[in-house]
Amino acid sequence: MKWKKYLSVFRLRFAMCLQYRTAAFAGVATQFVWGFMEINVFYAFRSSDPAAFPMGFEQLASYIWLQQAFLALFMVWFMENEIFDSIMDGNICYELCRPIDLYNLWFARSAAHRMSRALLRCAPILLAAFLLPPPYRMTLPPDALTLVCFVFAMLLSVTVTIALCMLVYMLSFFTVSPQGLRILFAMIAEVLQGIVIPLPFYPRNVRRLMEMLPFASMENVPLRIYSGNISGGEAVRAMLLQGFWVLLLIAAGKLICRRAMKKVTVQGG
């Protein structure tokens, strides 16, 4: 079956990325310190004006610890240099010689790359976060249904993130250097997906607009579902919007990929 070759690519890439344990442990320390610092900043903000705080503090703490634990899943800047290098130096020709769809190949690679890095880092961060004293401690979701919705939303959010990164890879075929595109998308995503400031802290009208964009369908939805900040019909609508962006971004990426393959030229001997 066709999907088996992409599953094999996923397994091989996943196993290879699991070898970078030292880098993962260093990342755990960095992300734990960063998460602790963020919580302290918001704690100071809440202490100065509790009425202006749009989330419960336990919700915010859970949001931040999940953000740090699964950083590799959601960060748009966490792209593969090898893919960009293959486009720029001509090694893409080896990929094109294989009887395999280039978009699906890179999608499987990207998924394995992100999931393996997240797997190495998430357990220590989550364990430490659950053992912290209040108000820094991470809490469990309100109920089992919320946990199920969180897992489902996580899968959709990772798919949206990868599909957006795939769009950057494909657009790189039409540029002299991919660095401009990479930096632009990463900067926009950090603001609009709720990395710098969670979306509930924005003014209502601005937040509603931001929540309609694909960036909000990344980490914003599953983390707010887990913390209980959104639930019920609002959570269902958010997941349906995630599904819409998954289909649209993948369709756009495949369309650009087909056009790029018709024009790609590899020079050299």
Image: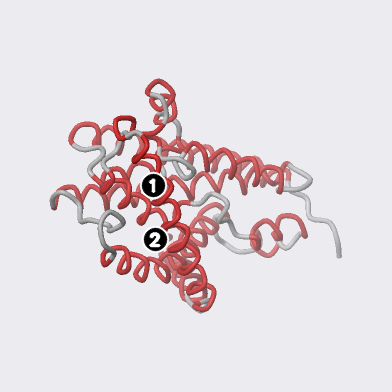
Q: In which quadrant will I find the C terminus? A: bottom right
Mark in the foreground, 2 or 1:
2
Q: Which mark is residue 157?
A: 1
Q: Residue at x 73, y 43 (%)?
A: 263
Outermost residue to the front: 48
* In-front residue for pair 83/122: 122
Q: Which of pointers 2 and 1 lies earlier in the amino acid sequence?
A: 2
- Residue 210, by quadrant, is top left
Q: Is 92 situated above or below 22?
A: above
**Spot occupied by residue 164 in the image (x, y as percentages of width and height):** 52, 44
Count neighbours of disc 1 (C-alpha within 10 A) and say few if under 14, some if 14 to 19, many if 20 or more. many
Q: Residue at x 55, y 56 (%)?
A: 78
Residue 23, position as x, y percentages in the image: 54, 73
Q: Nearer the viewer, residue 34 or 149?
A: 34
Vertical comparison of 137 with 182: above or below: below
Q: Is residue 268 left or right of residue 5?
A: right
* Figure check: 266 above or below 24: above
- In this image, 268 relative to 205: left or right? right
Picture coordinates of residue 47, whole percent (x, y) = 34, 41
Q: Nearer the viewer, residue 173 or 81?
A: 81
Q: Amino acid at mark 1?
A: Ser
Give the amino acid type for the residue marked by disc 2 in the picture: Ala
Q: Is residue 99 above or below residue 263?
A: below
Q: How many marks are shown on the rendered structure?
A: 2
Toward the right, the furthest residue is 269
Question: Which residue carries the number 2 mark?
Answer: 69
